[in-house]
């Protein structure tokens, strides 16, 4: 079977296209000629992303928050509220948001929804996406509940794209079954770079992230780190020491000028 | 002006019986009784009963021994209070402002209103005539201060009017009970031999202030009451104000039993309510929907909104979730929507249709929809609290309430992103007695600790907790695969507050 035949067969089998997707982009995806590699700070245009994470660590929610801040551009002027929805299992497994631990310019803007069932959590997510006054929505759902099937996922995607509010859905201990998210990440915690002043202490939050499904980006592995002002990425495996605690170079100024 | 309805409970009973004083069933001895822990006690007694020897406050059994023919009826203090409230509103015919003086009095502010009745004497005469016409035995008095008017109404001559500056001279002959004091203070004053207001004024302020120096409440401190009587210190009173609550209703020709019809009725009601509220320039914070059923049952559904609104579509959508379990039975014949709590809401620019379609809902509407389905406890925001204990450093508040004013957030060293609701016990291998942890087991998995920072010692808050609460040493740790946690050792070995220290995992770091 030569390459042309294979492509035409794929076209016949491919599912109906989602609204807002061009046929060309899909064929590029399928042929492996993706446009770009993802990197922090790039404009993705993605309104619905899923982050698969283990339940015994906070890396899923932390990466979702970091990606949300990355997408919003770390804007200090933005005072819109944001929504964090958890279902009961996620709340029990991975705990509740803690205000003093949140990033300083996000902590006073949080609205937390503790839903009992996954159905209620999905309802809260959809209502949050429909609201025009929210900056973004973070959802946390444990496992693969029956309510979160492809239809529910598609509803969330459509609501997010219609109203322009971004959704990061954290899936704790979940299989990556059918879903309509435009970008799907898999994340685990990674060893952090040793801080300069106390090498025995844990350093800045670091994650091993795998982008395993995306419409417009090539899949890949990164080691991501949350600096206070930006999301930093290294190709997986390179462990450079953390210079985040260093003072800035004095440059051409005199030291007395501060 | 102070009004004292001396026989309020009996007057109400007479009005209910429809008989005048001393006639009909009032001619025989009768008492109104209240149930107490020691048996029935007389709350009020009529003139015939009093003549036979029954007294208010006596036990019914004792009164029966004196007067075997005594008839009894139950007293109704709640009804008396409701009647007094209605009477307070009615008494605003003599002044713009009235206050309750439970259990049986009223205070009306008649400042500047007497000329409408032809002077204060005519005003008092009018009040006496109107009260008598309603069948109430009442005494009224006018004085410059509420305290003086109360004293004259209870203990002064009939229809007293007090004017001029030298109040004390004119009131000196009244008994000390005219000061509205508690019973034990009255007893104390009687034992001290102080019987008249003049006696109190004669012994000097310093002596009174010293004798009652640790009595804060005005009812227990004769000096404060005396100053209030003479107008030297202000006496705030709580006025009675009639509040009209917007209410709309639909009486239905045919009892309805089906949901679509009820939704239609609800839509009509919401539109009527929006019109009523718009006329007043208000929006509803709380709405009550009551449905009267044919079989004599009333179904009530309440709704509370995060921000004032009068949007009919929003109200209908919120009620739709609450009407699912409504049992119409044989049908609903009357539906009423009322707004017990309203707030000012100015007219706003109506959204242009295309923009509304694209922009979705407002924040308040979103919060309302979430709270109606999930409950008020489910939708909250974290608010800082001045405490060093991690779980107490934040509390959860309703989402749209304004943030409480805090001088400054506590600056903590490093805190985890998430906190478990209940710290989970873990088994830890550590350098005894108080060294760094090396290995721990949590939820069935073994974590080898690669790096740790600590301890950060957080002492118990002794002003809130018992003395036996142990301190906590917090460690920020990272295990060999990079997972970061916040764990603590509860207590020290040999601190005399329990056995060996236990370890807990409380937070998950980013």
Image (cartoon, grey):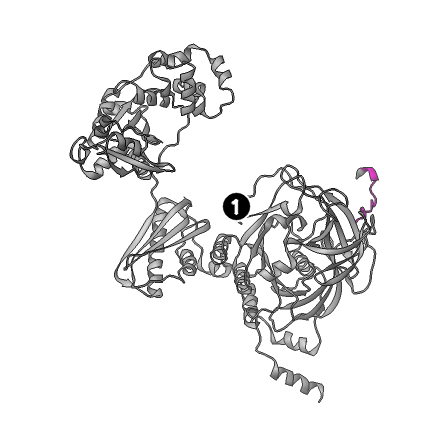
Quarter-of-image position of residue A17: bottom right
Q: Which of A232 and B477 is in front in this view?
A: B477
Q: In this view, does B359 lie to the left or right of B451?
A: left
Chain under label 1? B
Compared to residue B339, the image places residue B194 above or below, namely above
The residue that appears at 35% across and 13% down in the rendered structure is B172
Compared to residue B314, the image places residue A34 above or below, namely below
Compared to residue B79, the image places residue B144 above or below, namely above
Provide residue A216's location: percent of width, then percent of height: 66, 70
Quarter-of-image position of residue A66: bottom right
Quarter-of-image position of residue B384: top right
Q: Nearer the viewer, residue A107 or B186?
A: B186
Q: Name the residue under label 1.
A: B401
Which image quarter is the N terminus of chain B in?
top left
Compared to residue B422, the image places residue B384 above or below, namely above
Provide residue A111's location: percent of width, then percent of height: 57, 52
Can residue B492 be spotted in the picture? yes
Provide residue A225's location: percent of width, then percent of height: 74, 58
Q: Chief secondary structure of the magenta span?
A: loop
The residue that appears at 32% across and 24% down in the rendered structure is B111
Tally of marks: 1
Q: Nearer the viewer, residue B54 or A113?
A: B54
The residue that appears at 30% across and 22% down in the rendered structure is B153
Provide residue B425's location: percent of width, then percent of height: 69, 55
Which image quarter is the C terminus of chain B in?
bottom right
Q: Nearer the viewer, residue A116 or B22?
A: B22
Can residue A87 be spotted in the picture? no
Q: Any magenta on residue A248? A: yes
| Span shown in magenta | A243-256
Q: Residue furthest left?
A: B24
Helix, strand or loop at mark 1: loop
């Amino acid at each position: 079977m030569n390459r042309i035949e294979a492509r035409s067969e794929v076209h016949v089998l491919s599912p109906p296209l989602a609204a807002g997707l061009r046929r060309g982009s899909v064929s590029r995806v399928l042929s492996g000629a993706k446009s770009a590699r993802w990197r922090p700070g790039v404009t993705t245009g993605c309104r619905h992303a899923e982050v698969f994470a283990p339940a015994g660590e906070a890396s899923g929610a932390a990466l979702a928050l970091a990606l949300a801040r990355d997408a919003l551009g770390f804007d200090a002027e933005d005072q819109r509220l944001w929504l964090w929805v958890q279902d009961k299992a996620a709340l029990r497994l991975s705990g509740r948001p803690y205000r003093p631990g949140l990033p300083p310019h996000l902590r006073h803007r949080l609205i937390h929804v503790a839903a009992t069932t996954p159905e209620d959590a999905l309802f809260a997510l959809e209502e949050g996406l429909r609201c025009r006054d929210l900056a973004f929505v973070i959802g946390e759902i444990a496992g693969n509940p029956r309510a979160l099937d492809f239809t529910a996922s598609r509803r969330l995607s459509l609501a997010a794209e219609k109203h322009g509010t971004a959704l990061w859905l954290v899936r704790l201990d979940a299989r990556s079954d059918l879903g309509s998210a435009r970008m799907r990440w898999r994340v685990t915690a990674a060893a952090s770079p040793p801080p300069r002043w106390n090498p025995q202490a844990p350093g800045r939050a670091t994650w091993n992230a795998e982008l395993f499904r995306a419409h417009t980006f090539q899949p890949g592995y990164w080691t991501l780190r949350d600096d206070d002002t930006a999301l930093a990425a290294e190709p997986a495996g390179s462990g450079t020491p953390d210079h985040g605690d260093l003072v800035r170079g004095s440059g051409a100024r005199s030291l007395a000028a501060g | 002006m102070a009004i004292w309805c001396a026989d309020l409970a009996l007057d109400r009973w007479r009005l209910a019986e429809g008989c005048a004083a001393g006639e009909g069933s009032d001619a025989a001895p009768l008492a109104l009784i209240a149930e107490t822990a020691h048996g029935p006690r007389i709350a009020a007694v009529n003139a015939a009963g009093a003549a036979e020897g029954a007294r208010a406050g006596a036990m019914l059994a004792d009164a029966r021994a004196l007067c075997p023919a005594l008839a009894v009826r139950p007293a109704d203090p709640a009804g008396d209070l409701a009647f007094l409230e209605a009477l307070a509103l009615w008494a605003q015919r003599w002044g713009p402002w009235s206050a309750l003086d439970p259990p049986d009095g009223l205070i009306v502010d008649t400042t500047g209103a007497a000329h409408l009745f032809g002077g204060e004497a005519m005003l008092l005469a009018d009040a006496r005539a109107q009260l008598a016409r309603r069948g109430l035995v009442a005494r009224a008095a006018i004085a410059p201060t509420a305290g003086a008017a109360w004293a004259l109404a209870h203990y002064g001559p009939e229809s007293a009017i007090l004017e001029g500056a030298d109040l004390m001279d004119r009131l000196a002959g009244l008994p000390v009970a005219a000061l509205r004091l508690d019973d034990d203070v009255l007893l104390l004053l009687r034992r001290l031999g102080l019987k008249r207001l003049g006696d109190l004024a004669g012994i000097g302020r310093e002596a009174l202030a010293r004798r009652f120096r640790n009595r804060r409440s005005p009812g227990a401190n004769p000096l404060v009451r005396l100053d209030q009587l003479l107008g030297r210190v202000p006496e705030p009173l709580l006025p009675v104000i009639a509040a009209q609550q917007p209410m709309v209703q639909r009486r239905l020709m045919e009892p309805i039993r089906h949901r679509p019809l009820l939704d239609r009725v609800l839509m009509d009601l919401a539109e009527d309510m929006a019109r009523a509220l718009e006329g007043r320039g208000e929006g509803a914070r709380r709405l009550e929907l009551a449905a009267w059923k044919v079989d004599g049952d009333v179904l009530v559904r309440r709704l509370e909104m995060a921000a004032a609104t009068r949007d009919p579509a929003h109200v209908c959508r919120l009620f739709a979730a609450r009407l699912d379990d409504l049992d119409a039975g044989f049908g609903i014949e009357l539906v009423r929507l009322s707004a017990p709590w309203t707030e000012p809401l100015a007219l706003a620019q109506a959204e242009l249709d295309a923009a509304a379609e694209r922009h979705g809902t407002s924040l308040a509407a979103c919060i309302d929809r979430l709270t109606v389905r999930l409950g008020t406890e489910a939708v909250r925001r974290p608010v800082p609290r001045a405490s060093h204990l991690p779980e107490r450093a934040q509390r959860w508040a309703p989402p749209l309430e304004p943030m409480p004013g805090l001088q400054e957030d506590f600056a903590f060293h490093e805190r985890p992103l998430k906190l478990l609701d209940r710290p989970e016990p873990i088994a830890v291998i550590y350098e005894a007695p108080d060294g760094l942890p090396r290995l721990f087991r949590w939820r069935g998995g073994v974590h080898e600790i690669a790096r740790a920072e600590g301890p950060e010692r957080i002492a118990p808050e002794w002003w809130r907790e018992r003395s036996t609460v142990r301190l906590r040493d917090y460690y920020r740790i990272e295990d060999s695969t990079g997972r970061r946690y916040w764990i603590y050792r509860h207590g020290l070995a040999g601190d005399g507050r329990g056995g060996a220290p236990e370890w807990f995992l409380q937070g998950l770091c980013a």
